[in-house]
Amino acid sequence: MIGVGVKGKYGDSGFARMTALVVFAAGASAGAQQMKPVQPYPVQRVEQHAEVAPKAEVFKVFQFPADQIPRIDGDDSDWKMVPESYSIGLNKMSDDEHKHATPDAKDLDVHVKVGWVKGLNRLYFLYEAYDNFWDFSDPGLHNDTFEIVVDGDRSGGPLIPQFRNNADQEEYDAHFSMHGVQAQNYHIMTPHEGKDWALAWGCQPWDKELPWANHAQKYNFKHGEPGKYILEFYITPFDYAGCEGPERAVESKLFEGKTIGLSWAVIDYDGSEKNNGFWNLGLEHTMYGNATLLREFRLMPLEGSLAPKIAARWSFKVLDMQRRLVAFEDESVGATSWKWDFGDGASSTEQHPLHTYAKAGQYVVALYVEGPAGKARMSKIWDVTVR
């Protein structure tokens, strides 16, 4: 009885050659299992090419209105507002193991939509798939899989020990220092039955749990049967997700217009030991372990039909408390003129004014805006307080 690597599960792909930290090996008696560490896998270098590749398509991330955040319940009705231009199917992906020249919807059909909400550092996903053979009876990695890699600040670089920069670093030292730290990889089991919903491939399994992630699935088929599958979930991208736990973690800040790194692969099994396809959205097969190879996704503004025609919005920052100097920033929609009431008798018609208060106090500040669609006001009570 010996430990075996993941290669036997996934065939000859680069993904197959990932190093498992612990694997289960079959015992001499039926049902017996034991755990044995795998020997460190050699470091694989990712080549850096000097030539500039043609500009790849930038995909869109739909912005949900704050009052219409999708409910994670496996019901796709919350996503009906999302235009089809946000949907990414197998026609945008390639089977980079070359088992299929083109997608065949009778064998496998997948559509993915990604969303976000201003003010929340979450990425929402709707995964809808048809498969002619759903494979999910094995308790381990052998499972139809939706594999996601996200790099919230596009810092790029290796995220698994196999591609670590320091070749002389012991593999488990690399695992506990850099595996999934600056970019995260999730192997999501589709469906997950009698097992956890995802492998957070790294040293931080906490990032697949609430409040950083949530999931719900809907299906009505058994192992080996065809059918339609729906999965709703969200994840939180991290600029730093250390092995020590969430105490020092740094969430990726999501804001309108930001471009993030994101890719996924659909690993399809049809009852055999080797997979029947590795459908990849990434620039190269090894995107699963190198965030530099992820695709660009842009966080979009609200669609025109969902955005207000006129709205007054603003924020502020105290630049110097000793001088009581405050910077005000207009964030209004549809405005062409502005009037600020600073609450101390002073006002301004600048869009982004600076104001110095003469004395300490709690102030009611109001912004009045006008535009082609009308007028609006936003006041904040005592948010602006100086001493």
Image (tube, helix red, strand yellow):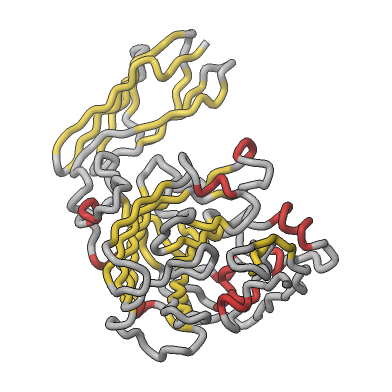
Q: Is residue 195 in view from this perspective?
A: yes
- Residue in the image at 34% along x and 38% along y: 331
Q: Nearer the viewer, residue 254 or 150?
A: 150
Q: Residue furthest right?
A: 168
Name which residue lies at 41% across and 47% down. 214
| 136 and 111: which is toward the camera | 136
What residue sits 50% from the left and 84% below the top?
96
Q: x, y (%) of residue 55?
A: 47, 77
Relative to 71, is 296 on the left or the right?
right
Is any part of residue 264 visible from this angle? no
The residue sitting at 76% across, 58% down in the picture is 172
Please state the total of marks drawn on the protein image: 0
Q: Position of residue 346 (x, y in %)?
A: 35, 17
x and y, in percent, of residue 366 in the image: 30, 22
Question: Does 49 sit above or below residue 183?
Answer: below
**Left or right: where does residue 206 sit relative to residue 175?**
left
Q: Is residue 195 above or below residue 157?
A: above
Is 23 left or right of 121, judged from the image as shown? Answer: right
The front one of 252 and 279 is: 279
Tell me the quadrant of the picture where the N terminus can be found.
bottom right
Residue in front for this viewpoint, 19 or 329: 19
